[in-house]
Image (tube, grey):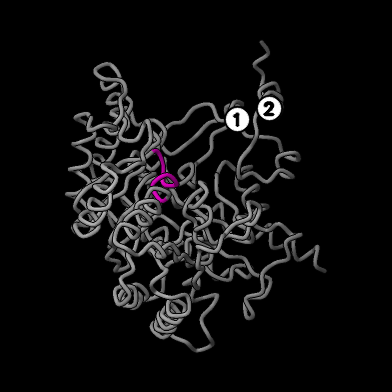
Amino acid sequence: MDTTVQSWERRELGSFFHTFSDLASLREDGPAIVEKGDGAYIFDTAGKRYFEGNSGLWNMTLGFSETRLAEVAARQYAQFPGYHTFFGRNSKPTIALAERMLELAPVPMSRVFFTNSGSDANESVIKLLWMMWAAEGQPRRRKLLTRKNAYHGATVMASALTGKDYVRAFGLPNAEIVTLDCPHSWRFALPGESDEDYSARLAARLEQQIVAEGPETIAGMFAEPVMGAGGVIVPPDGYFRMIQPVLQRYGIPLVADEVICGFGRTGHLWGAQAVGLRPDIIVASKSMSAGYFPMGAVMLSADMDKRATAACELWEEFPHGYTTGGHPVGCAISLEAIRIITEEGILDNIRKVGPVFQAGLRTLAEHPMVGEARGLGLMGALEMVADKKTKTAYAGEYRVGDRIAKAARDLGFIIRPLGASVVLAPPFIATLDQIGQLLDVLKRILDDVHADVCRRCA
């Protein structure tokens, strides 16, 4: 069998149906076939090394060669390779992981159940909320509050919660989704409006929308502490402090989607701690297993646990679950990943390199094509604009984000394009030297792309 690089690319294009990929760019540039990893780096089939500036999809937080996770997986596979949590059955690693997550929760939580991903976890919460409200005699409470630019997953209702235009491809969102304002003060605050004033305005608009929809129809609100796939949007000062009393006034549970932020990404163990959020339900995934196994989790407060349990008793069970939810190997890996993050200096490293990363991004905000640099911890974004004063975005035909990402890839750095923005989320193990190299390369690329765009505009 031909194993040349060109052969792998031909085989890939002839057999694999790509998800979330720019098909025009794929036809133009071809796929990237990754063969191995070492620390924060990945290597393609031609042997070229790349610094993974997005930790895969936010998830490979301990890099690509953490032998301790591989060793834990091998031991668990040898001892007990797989099982389920249906019919009252369980395994030791699953119980131990649930206990550890409750110990580390940002606010008191009561119980945990496991899923295969963040999408599955959000989908599970929706079903649990609908079941709970119906059992409490309020079956009309089915509407779900989300926010423009949010991302909550790829399953049907999680996609409906996702406040991105592309969900219209599936005929979503549906009538049970209520989309709120995006808490992006740089883009949407009024001239002269402070962060506190902007937060107060969004809280007032939230209450207006709840009243207009009818509080008796709303099941819950989903919110990422910091919006990840929406462009690393950090909420303005006071945002969660102001919206939470509104939700409490109308008895609306708040679900913190910690899929991206959880387990260190913001420089805190939980994003909720970084932004002053006190959720009723927490959803976790990604860094939970450092990407070494598909894992997701739902954590319930004591009140949610009590109410959900009462609802389940009407049916004699929670009629929902996943064959591999709470998989013993995944739970063993997650236990070790969380131990490494919390006990082996990884969280300290994020707190050391994160401020340098953020300061470097803020310096790049002075570049003539950068409208805003934003972020927290080891997540950040640069939003490109054609006019800094008016914040006018570049026309789509310029494909600014794609061009920056492609130029970075040519130089051995993986970053993510997002429209006219680029998103960065380095692994938690990134060093100061690696962060410095990433920022230096970005500056060079911004200069080159800006000069080329200016020539095309002339």
From the viewer's perspective, is residue 343 above or below residue 387? above
Hey, which quadrant is residue 72 in on the image?
Answer: top left
Q: Say which residue label 2 marks.
A: 9
Mark 2 Cα shell of 10 Å, populated few (<14), some (14-19), many (≥20): some
Identify the amino acid type marked 1: Ile
From the viewer's perspective, is residue 335 above or below residue 45? below
Q: For the residues labelled 1 and 2, say whether their Cβ atoms are less than 8 Å apart.
A: yes
Q: Where is residue 330 in the image (x, y as percent from the top left)?
A: 32, 32
Q: On the rendered structure, is 102 left or right of 237?
A: left
Q: Position of residue 180 (x, y in %)?
A: 49, 71
Q: Let me know if residue 121 is in the magenta part.
A: yes
Residues 351 and 118: in front is 118
Residues 229 and 408: in front is 229
Quarter occupied by the C terminus: bottom right
Q: Let me know if residue 139 is in the magenta part.
A: no
Residue at image coords 61%, 26% = 46
Q: Can residue 45 be seen in this view?
A: yes
Identify the amino acid type marked 2: Glu
Given the current orientation, which residue lies at the most extreme right position? 458
Q: On the rendered structure, is 435 left or right of 385?
A: left
Hey, which quadrant is residue 33 in on the image?
Answer: top right
Given the current orientation, which residue lies at the most extreme top position? 1
From the viewer's perspective, is residue 86 above or below residue 177? above
Q: Say which residue label 1 marks.
A: 33
Residue at image coords 65%, 47% = 406
Helix, strand or loop at disc 2? helix
Q: Is residue 62 visible?
A: no
Residues 390 and 319: in front is 319
Q: Give the range drawn in magenta.
A: 116-122
Q: On the rendered structure, is 292 left or right of 156?
A: left
Quarter occupied by the N terminus: top right
